Amino acid sequence: MAPRWTPDEARKHLTGWERSGESAYTYAARLGVSQQRFFYWREALARIDPPNREKPTQFVELAVADRRVGVEVRFPSGHVVVVQPGSGVALGDLLRLVEWLAC
């Protein structure tokens, strides 16, 4: 049985997992722990360290070259948001969705 993690160790492993692009199962297997440990710590740390809304971790500039074409935003999590021209989606609505997906 693998030793228990401290919150700092969990943060380190969760960051490594997110950067790896691997599934929780694959990454956890490489470490010799269960994938449930990752999910437990992700939830536990979300309660301990709520997301800081004032400091974005990364900003990507978006430019729309042709306004007749929709906008597609792809997230590292795999989520994809597509806004078609004339859909009536306001920028504020799109930003609220982006914020919700980032949590």
Image (cartoon, grey):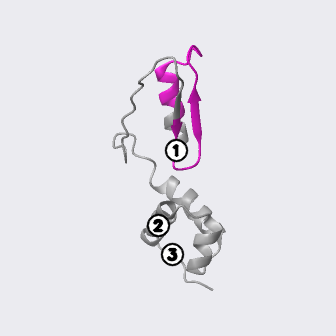
- Binning the other alpha carbons within 10 Å of mark 2 as few (below 14), some (14 to 19) or many (20 upward) gives few
Residue that sits furthest to the bottom in the current view: 1
CA separation in Å, label 1 and label 2: 17 Å
Judging depth in this view, the residue of 49 and 97 nearest the camera is 97
Which residue carries the number 3 mark? 5
Residue at (38% x, 40% y) in the render: 60
Residue located farthest toward the left when viewing the structure as drawn: 55
Q: In this view, does 49 lie above or below 26?
A: above
Badge 1 crowding class, 10 Å Cα cut-off, few under 14, some 14 to 19, many 20 or more, is few
Point 58% across, 83% down: residue: 2
Mark 1 vs mark 2: in front = 1
Q: How far apart are marks 3 and 2 (CA)?
A: 14 Å
**Mark 1 or mark 2: whose residue is earlier in sequence:** 2
- Estimate the x, y position of residue 85 in percent, counting from the top left: 55, 17
Q: Residue 33 or 17: which is nearer the viewer?
A: 17
User: What label sits on residue 61 in the rendered view?
Assistant: none
The kind of secondary structure element at disc 3 is loop
x and y percentages locating residue 16 in the rendered image = 46, 67
* Number of the label disc, if any, that sits on residue 75: 1
Q: Distance between the residues labelled 1 and 3?
A: 28 Å
Q: Which amino acid does label 3 sit on?
A: Trp
Give yes or no for contact between labels 1 and 2 (Cβ–Cβ under 8 Å).
Answer: no
**Does 16 sit above or below residue 43?**
below
Residue 8 spot, x, y in % from top left = 42, 69
Check disc 1 and give the amino acid type: Phe
In what element is the residue under mark 2? helix
Say which quadrant the N terminus sits in: bottom right
The answer to whether 65 is drawn above or below residue 59 in the figure is above
| Residue tagged 2 | 16
- Whether residue 6 sits left or right of residue 28 in the image: it is left
1 or 3: tag closer to the N-terminus: 3
